[in-house]
Every structure is written in structure tokens, then in C-alpha cells.
Image (cartoon, helix red, strand yellow):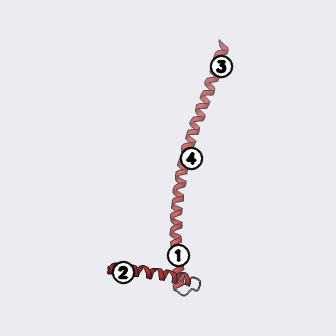
Amino acid sequence: MSVIAAIIDTLENKVGKLILKIQNLEKNTQDLHIELTKSAQIIQAQNLEIEALKAQYETLKMASALLGSDENKRDTKLKINSLIREIDYCIAQLAD
């Protein structure tokens, strides 16, 4: 009978250790989910910042071209032509 009791005690110990490991893994999983959520928020904020900086760069590039920079004259002319076409379209829509 003592052999069976020893086996049962060993099994109880192993089951207890497995339960502790499962609890630790669940806690680690929760921590990783929280970290993943935070990382996703940081990435989203950085993407918004990148888009804002790209828009600011394009604005600065256009302003530089308007001030006489030879580098971006073609882009500026294309943008001005595009704006003129949009204005003409709006005027045509208002005239109807």
C-alpha cells in the first residue's frame, strides 16, 4: 500500500507543478498580449507621425520650389496646373 501512496504523492506533485506551469504560462500570455497592444499603439502613433511628416515635407518642398529652388520646379508646375484644373472644374460645376 505504501508503494501506491508514494506513486499517488508523486503524481500529485507532478500535477501541482503542471498547474503552476500552466498558470505561469497564462500570466506570460496575458503580459505578452498587453505588450503587443502597447506596441500596436506605438506603431499606429508612429505611422500617423510619419504621414504628418511626409505631408510637411511635401509642403516644404513646394514652398522651396516657389521661392526659386531649381530642384523642384517641375513638380511645382505640375501641382499648380493640377490646382488650376480643379478650380476650373469647380467653376464649371458652379456655372451649371
* Residue at point 51%, 84% (across, down): 77
Disc 1 to disc 3, C-alpha distance:
75 Å
Between disc 1 and disc 3, the foreground one is: 1
Q: Secondary structure at mark 4?
A: helix
Q: Residues within 10 Å of mark 2 (few under 14, many from 20)?
A: few
Indicate the quadrant containing the N terminus: top left, top right, bottom left or bottom right: top right
Q: Is residue 68 above or below residue 20?
A: below
Q: Residue furthest bottom?
A: 68
CA gap, disc 2 to disc 3? 91 Å
Which residue carries the number 1 mark? 58
Who comes first in sequence, dot 4 or dot 2? 4
- Which mark is nearer the camera, 4 or 1? 1
Residue occupying image coordinates x 56% and y 39%: 26
Who is closer to the viewer here, 79 or 29?
Answer: 79
Q: Is tag 4's residue or tag 1's residue first in the polypeptide sequence?
A: 4
Residue at the spot of label 3? 7
User: Label 4, on which residue?
Assistant: 32
Do labels 4 and 3 touch, CB within 8 Å?
A: no
Q: Residue furthest front?
A: 96
* Amino acid carrying mark 3 in the image: Ile
Q: Which residue is mark 2?
A: 92
What amino acid is found at the position of numbered circle 1 in the picture? Glu
Task: Name the image quarter holding the C terminus.
Answer: bottom left
Q: Position of residue 14 (x, y in %)?
A: 63, 27
Choose the circle earlier in sequence order: 1 or 3.
3
Q: Nearer the viewer, residue 74 or 42?
A: 74
